[in-house]
Each structure stands twice: as C-alpha cells, then as structure tokens.
Image: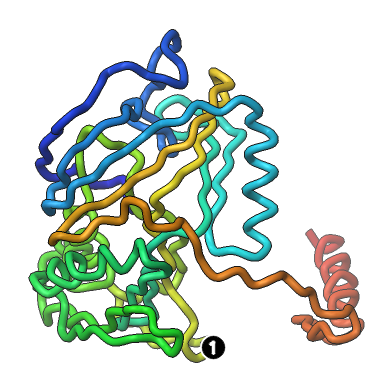
C-alpha cells in the first residue's frame, strides 16, 4: 500500500509554518486517509532531486467545489476519494480529488506503462525514466510515443527469485517495486499530500503467488492504475475547511510553471438500455430452485 513507507530525505528551501486554510484547528491525528502534517506553501527538493513549488489556496464553499470536481470527472481523467467513516488510528473523514493529472501509471501482469497526459507531465518523464532505469526489478524499459504523440515509458519487471524467505515475499521483484521507486523519487517529509493516487486490482496478489488463474481474464485488463496529480482539492470534514494544493516541478532544466493544467476531455455518452450487455450468473429459475432446496435442508436441521 502507498502509505506503508517512509519518505526519503528531502530539503526544504522555503517552508512557512502558517496554515492558511485553518490557523486555529489542531492537526488531525494520523489516520489512514488523513495527512500526517498540514501542507504549507513553499519550495522544497524531493528525495529524487526534483524541485517542487507548492501553494495552498483556501476555498469557501466546499460543497460547490466537490460538486464541480465530480461533474468534471464525467469527461476528464482524475479521481475522487470521500470517506464519511471515522475510527481513531484507522479511518478518517477526509475528502480529496483531482482532474487532469500530469502522469498516469498503468500495469497489467508484469508489464507497465507510464504516460505523460499533458505538457506538465512531459517535464517529469525524464526523471521517472532515470529512476526506473536504476530500479533492480525492471527487466526492460523504453521511451516511445503514443499515437497522439505523448511520451510514454513502457517496460516489464523481472520474475521473482526462485527461492526466498517468507518474510521477503513482498520485497520480491514486482510492480510494487516500481511504486517504491516512484515514492522515493517524489517523497518529502515536509509534503504529505504529493504522491500516487488510484486503484489496486485483486490480481496484484499474483505478483507474489504463482497461481494458475481459474477464471478467464480480459486481455490487457489493468491490475493497477495510479495518477500523480499536481493539483488537489482537499476537504477536512472535522474543521469544515477546504483548500486547493497546486504543485509545479522543476528538474533537468525544465519546469512545469506556466504550463496549462489541461487534459483530454471525452464527453460521457451512456449506452441506450437496449444495447447494454445482458449478464447473469444463474439461468432462469436456477436461484429459486436453490432456495427451495435450502428450505428442505433447513427442515432437516
């Protein structure tokens, strides 16, 4: 999981301690889904040598901001995470989301692709390429272009070792090795919110267990989809505070400052109901016959 790890070293170049979105509230306790420390604007250098300029903009109507973001997700890439459940030390009521992230990380089996989704993402392709080229788990990696002309890194990871101690199972070569490499590239203790957001599929368990699948898989189905956002909407349910975090990256003589935070927009067009595929796991009447049989078994006791 993404929050398992500790950031590598980083240097803060200019980091005010004031919380512009809420100066009176106490920082939340460390829960899954909640930032460990409040984000402050300033400039810092990540563990991988990327200079980041961050800003924090307080927002007024948090509900309107959330609704606007949700509407954009109908046609633009991004994510929305919202939790209404609280349990100390485990879950927290936080809401966060974004659209048009600069980078997308996809994996299927032991192959992967990291694509720049806009000009801002192009700035980060070179340092990501360098970081993954140094990763011992990477078997092959190459830089190419998509049909639309976007830069994309494609590659594969090595198979796990033939024998290893059980406690080293999760440290074998896998897609998670790349997640750790990207974590180290972008990590900074002073910035708790910059990172990878997305979804992990069930089939990632096969990265560690050589199990022969019993069910057929759709060719090319993604086991992992993560984004690196450079603009985040964050809502603290406790304090009713809302703010927008923005990041600009400078590395290798290139900077994302001034480049548009844009992306491909594809309007959502639902299929007509009559065109929806018909799927069911029981033949007509099969479930009713199971219930009838169960009733007889219940009578037996």
Quadrant showing the C terminus: bottom right
- Looking at the rendering, which quadrant does residue 136 occupy? bottom left
Q: Residue furthest front?
A: 258
Q: Decide: is 218 above or below 62.
A: below
Q: Nearer the viewer, residue 218 or 263?
A: 263
| Residue 44 in picture, x, y percent from top left | 18, 38
Res 42 → quadrant: top left
Q: Nearer the viewer, residue 197 or 126?
A: 126
**Residue 26 in which image quadrant:** top left
| Label 1 crowd (10 A; few <14 / some 14-19 / many >=20) | few
Q: Position of residue 261 (x, y in %)?
A: 46, 56
The residue under the point 19% across, 70% down is 126
User: Relative to residue 23, is residue 94 drawn left or right?
Assistant: right
- For image coordinates 85% across by 73% down, the residue present is 293
Along the line of sight, the residue nearer the viewer: 23 or 110 = 23
Name the residue beneath numbered marker 1. 218
Q: Is residue 88 above or below residue 127?
A: above
Residue 115 placed where, x, y %? 36, 74
Residue at image point 10% right, 41% down: 9
Which residue shows up at 68% across the image and 62% down it? 74
Horizontal relation, residue 293 to residue 140: left or right: right
Helix, strand or loop at mark 1: loop
Q: Is residue 137 left or right of residue 115?
A: left
Task: Please name whichever residue, 233 or 54, is drawn nearer the observer in this view of the structure.
Answer: 54
């Amino acid at each position: 999981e993404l929050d398992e790890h500790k950031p590598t070293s980083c240097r803060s170049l200019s980091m005010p301690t004031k919380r512009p979105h809420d100066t009176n509230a106490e920082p939340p306790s460390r829960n899954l889904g909640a930032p460990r420390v409040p984000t402050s604007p300033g400039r810092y250098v990540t563990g991988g040598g990327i200079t980041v300029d961050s800003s924090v903009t307080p927002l007024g109507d948090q509900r309107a901001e959330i609704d606007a973001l949700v509407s954009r997700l109908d046609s633009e890439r991004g994510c929305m995470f919202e939790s209404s459940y609280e349990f100390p030390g485990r879950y927290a009521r936080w809401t966060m989301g974004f659209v048009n992230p600069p980078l997308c990380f996809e994996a299927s089996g032991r192959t992967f692709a990291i694509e720049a989704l806009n000009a801002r993402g192009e700035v980060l392709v070179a340092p990501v390429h360098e970081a993954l080229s140094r990763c011992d788990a990477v078997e092959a990696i190459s830089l190419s272009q998509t049909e639309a002309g976007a830069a994309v890194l494609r590659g594969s990871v090595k198979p796990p070792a033939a024998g290893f101690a059980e406690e080293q199972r999760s440290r074998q070569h896998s897609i998670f090795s790349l997640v750790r490499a990207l974590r180290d590239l972008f990590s900074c203790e002073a910035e708790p919110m910059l990172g990878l957001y997305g979804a992990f599929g069930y089939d990632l368990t096969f990265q560690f267990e050589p199990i022969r699948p019993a069910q057929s898989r759709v060719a090319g189905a993604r086991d992992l989809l993560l984004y690196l956002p450079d603009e985040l909407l964050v809502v603290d349910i406790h304090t009713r505070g809302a703010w927008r975090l923005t990041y600009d990256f400078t590395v290798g003589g290139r900077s994302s400052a001034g480049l548009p935070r844009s992306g491909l927009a594809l309007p959502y067009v639902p299929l007509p109901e009559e065109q929806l595929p018909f799927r069911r796991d029981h033949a007509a009447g099969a479930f009713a016959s199971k219930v009838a049989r169960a009733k007889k078994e219940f009578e037996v006791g």
